[in-house]
Image: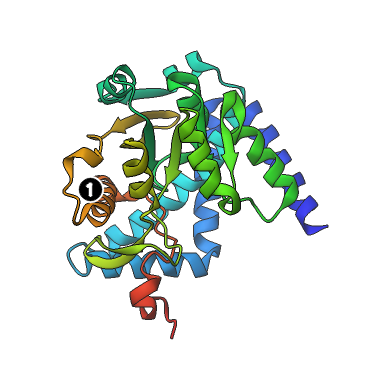
């Protein structure tokens, strides 16, 4: 009953934001984001703990508060984009997104290299699903199903639009291998704590990071291409592509570790350039520093 009620609230939200003119939508979303910022005390505390842990006293308390507020606003904007993007074609995405350093992808396709896109919970990370399939070729992504079955159906519609294949974590291992064998592009979000992987340095601290991406890249001679969708203004984004992580450029002895660290490094670099759009509300440092979240 509660799940269906939440689904109805989402439907009402969707109706409102798709009906209103853009300037009123932004006012509505900004107000909603601030309201959630005020009432969502638990995750706000996680965000503050993360910012204290990463920045210490190198930035002011006011700046930390601003980053947290902006992070909530980014999440609410993503919900709006989730509604709007379901009806977009490639022309619509091209009007919304400016791609920076696209030649990295063009060169990879020209040289017939398999491609593994990586990103973080940064900016509009969901934008990549349909955009990459439409622009670069059939894409396979891994996503965590929502607990609400009604909302999950909506999420799957967006994530599997335009030829995108979605795998759950349970079928990811075999599914990703099969996708690479079929020359599909992979799209993976790799910045959160999941309790497994290898130790890397991230934002100045030791964390666990999945090494499976490096292993797949080595096995299939694939390029790992970091890409992040940063919001420039309401509804407008830059898809910034970083230099590919090529398994051929790493020594065999520490290849997996070094390639995994390289992924953490590029995510860190992008976050620090504009920290307001990262999902700070996640317990990223839980593996080795759970006490910062008041956990024993």
Quarter placement of the C terminus: bottom left
Q: Name the residue under label 1.
A: 269
Above or below 42: residue 81: above
Q: Is residue 218 left or right of residue 212?
A: left
- Which residue appears at 34% of the width and 29% of the height? 238
- The answer to which quarter of the image holds residue 202 is bottom left
- Which residue appears at 25% of the width and 46% of the height? 266
Residue 258 at x, y percent in the picture: 21, 53
- Which residue appears at 64% of the width and 40% of the height? 155
Of all residues, the one furthest to the bottom in this rendering is 296
Q: Is residue 247 left or right of residue 92?
A: left
Above or below 201: residue 69: above
Above or below 125: residue 37: below
Asked whether 114 or 125 is in front, the reply is 114
Residue 271 at x, y percent in the picture: 29, 49
Q: How many numbered discs?
A: 1
Of all residues, the one furthest to the top in this rendering is 91
Residue 57 shows in this picture: yes
* Scheme of colours in the image: rainbow
- The answer to which quarter of the image holds residue 291 is bottom left
Q: In this view, does 127 lie to the left or right of 108?
A: right
Asked whether 75 or 175 is in front, the reply is 175
Q: For label 1, count other residues whose C-alpha is less than 10 Å away and answer few (under 14), some (14-19) or many (20+).
A: few
* Mark 1 element type: helix
Above or below 77: residue 260: below
Residue 263 at x, y percent in the picture: 28, 48
- Which residue appears at 38% of the width and 62% of the height? 197
Residue 222 at x, y percent in the picture: 33, 35
Of all residues, the one furthest to the right in this rendering is 1
- The answer to which quarter of the image holds residue 208 is bottom left
Asked whether 264 or 46 is in front, the reply is 264
Quarter placement of the N terminus: bottom right
């Amino acid at each position: 009953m509660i799940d269906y009620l939440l689904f109805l609230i989402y439907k009402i939200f969707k109706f409102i934001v798709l009906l209103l003119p853009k300037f009123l939508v932004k006012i509505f979303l900004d107000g909603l984001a601030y309201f959630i910022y005020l009432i969502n005390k638990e995750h706000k505390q996680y965000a503050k703990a993360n910012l204290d842990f990463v920045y210490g006293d190198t930035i002011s308390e006011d700046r930390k508060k601003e980053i947290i507020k902006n992070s909530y606003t980014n999440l609410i904007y993503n919900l709006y984009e989730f509604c709007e993007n379901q009806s977009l074609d490639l022309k619509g995405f091209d009007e919304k997104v400016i791609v920076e350093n696209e030649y990295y992808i063009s060169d990879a396709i020209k040289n017939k290299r398999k491609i593994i896109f990586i990103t973080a919970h940064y900016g509009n990370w969901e934008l990549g699903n349909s955009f990459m399939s439409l622009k670069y070729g059939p894409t396979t992504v891994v996503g965590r199903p929502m607990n609400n079955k009604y909302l999950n159906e909506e999420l799957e519609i967006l994530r599997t639009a335009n030829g995108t294949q979605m795998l759950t974590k349970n079928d990811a291992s075999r599914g990703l291998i099969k996708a690479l064998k079929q020359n599909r592009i992979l799209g993976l979000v790799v910045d959160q704590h999941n309790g497994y992987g290898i130790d890397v340095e991230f934002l100045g601290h030791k964390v666990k990071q999945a090494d499976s991406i490096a292993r797949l890249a080595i096995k299939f001679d694939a390029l790992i291409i970091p890409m992040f969708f940063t919001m420039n203004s309401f509804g407008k984004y830059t898809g910034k592509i970083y230099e590919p992580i090529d398994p051929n450029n790493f020594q065999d002895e520490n290849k997996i570790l070094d390639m995994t660290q390289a992924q953490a490094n590029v995510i860190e670099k992008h976050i620090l350039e504009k920290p307001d759009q990262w999902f700070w509300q996640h317990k990223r440092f839980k593996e080795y520093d759970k006490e910062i979240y008041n956990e024993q």
